């Protein structure tokens, strides 16, 4: 039987902050800022290079990235900008959950 941990008021507040966070970064801005190719952007967003190419096209073949894609690029930009400031323990909890974390 499942016994989930109840949420505290603080945790509910944190969830609401996350839900309302408008952290977004466009593929064009990310591409212009960082020395990446379409394949790398695709890996960041879990998309194929052909999907990423459509984000940069004009006209009929253009496809807009999803909010999730914009969010992935914003998070990656944040990590690239602030990597040195993030304590390694926190970074490993966030990015390496298979290393014995409770989040696996």
Image (tube, helix red, strand yellow):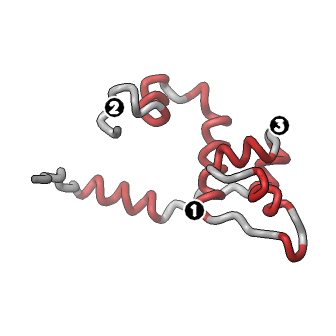
Q: Quadrant of residue 97?
A: top left
Residue at point 33% right, 31% down?
101
Q: Residue under circle 1?
A: 22
Identify the secondary structure beneath mark 3: loop
Q: Which quadrant, please, contains the C terminus? A: top left
Query: Dot 3: within a 10 Å radius of its alpha carbon, few (fewer than 14), some, or many (20 or more) residues?
Result: few
- Dot 2 lies on which element? loop
Please give the label number shown on residue 35. Answer: 3
Q: Is residue 96 left or right of residue 58?
A: left
Q: What's the CA distance linking mark 2 and mark 3?
A: 32 Å
51 sits to left or right of 103: right
Residue plotted at (82% across, 70% down): 62
Q: Which mark is residue 87?
A: none
Which numbered disc flags the more N-terminal residue, 1 or 3? 1
Front tag of 1 and 2: 2
Q: Label 1's element?
A: loop
Q: Earlier in the sequence, mark 2 or mark 3?
A: 3
Cα separation, mark 1 vs mark 2, equals 27 Å
* Crowd rating for badge 2 (residues with CA inside 10 Å; few <14, some 14–19, many 20+): few
Check contact, mark 1 vs mark 2: CB within 8 A: no
């Amino acid at each position: 039987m499942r016994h989930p941990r109840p949420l505290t008021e603080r945790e509910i507040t944190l969830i609401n902050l996350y839900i309302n966070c408008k952290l977004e970064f466009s593929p064009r801005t990310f591409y212009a800022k960082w020395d990446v190719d379409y394949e790398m952007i695709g890996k960041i967003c879990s998309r194929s290079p052909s999907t990423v190419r459509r984000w940069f096209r004009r006209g009929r073949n253009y496809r807009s990235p999803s909010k999730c894609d914009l969010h992935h690029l914003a998070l990656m930009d944040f990590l690239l900008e602030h990597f040195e400031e993030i304590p390694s323990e926190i970074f490993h909890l966030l990015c390496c959950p298979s290393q014995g974390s409770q989040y696996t």
